[in-house]
Image (cartoon, helix red, strand yellow):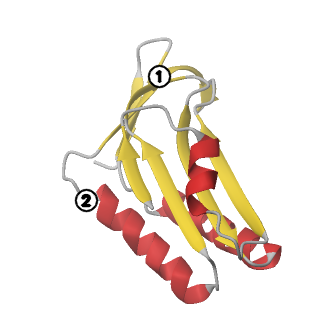
Amino acid sequence: MIELTYKPISPDTVVNKVKTDSSGCVVTYIGLIRDYSRGKPVLSVEYSDAQATAEGRLQAIASEIRQKWQINNIAICHRIGKLKVGDINLVIAIAATHRQEGFAACQYAIDQFKQKLPTRKKETYQNDSTWVEGE
């Protein structure tokens, strides 16, 4: 399951969508908007997908994971739009028969997401300065 959404993400809902009867675990990662970044207090973070490429990039990460590890299911849910401190911006859930594969696959998914940020990210700080990644 790959999802881009403007709505808040429920980790429980994502876990319930990926778990199967043969799953021994669901390893999850929940990304949050933190209150401090680049040495400045954060006001908001905005993610956008103006070029409509994010879903394909997330699908590619999921496909790589399925080739590298034996997993039962995978979900990558990324919230776009303007988020405030404490909001969930990313939920990754990997259902696997064994925890070793689940943890390895989840770590890989997080690293790939960070390395290949599929959306444009704009941080706005409390002093009204901004920083943009992905342009």
Identify whether 106 is placed above or below 123: below
Which residue position is annotated with label 1? 44
Towards the viewer: 129 or 69: 69
Disc on the earlier residue, 1 or 2: 1
Residue type (three-letter) at the residue carrying disc 1: Ser
**Residue at the extreme left of the image, as rendered:** 51
**Residue at the extreme front of the image, as rendered:** 21
- Residue 36 percent location from the top left of the image: 63, 26
Q: Tell me which residue sits at (40%, 26%) in the image.
A: 130
- Residue 50 percent location from the top left of the image: 20, 45
Which residue position is annotated with label 2? 53
Identify whether 2 is placed above or below 45: below
Q: Residues within 10 Å of mark 1 (few under 14, many from 20)?
A: many
Q: Is residue 117 visible?
A: no
Task: Answer left or right for 105 relative to 134.
Answer: right
Helix, strand, or loop for circle 2?
loop
Q: Tell me which residue sits at (57%, 50%) in the image.
A: 14
Task: Answer left or right for 28 relative to 50.
Answer: right
Q: Residues within 10 Å of mark 2 (few under 14, many from 20)?
A: few
Towards the viewer: 125 or 16: 16
Q: CA distance from mark 1 to mark 2?
A: 23 Å
Q: Quadrant of residue 40?
A: top right
Identify whether 3 is placed above or below 130: below
Q: Tell me which residue sits at (18%, 52%) in the image.
A: 51
Task: Answer left or right for 129 relative to 74.
Answer: left
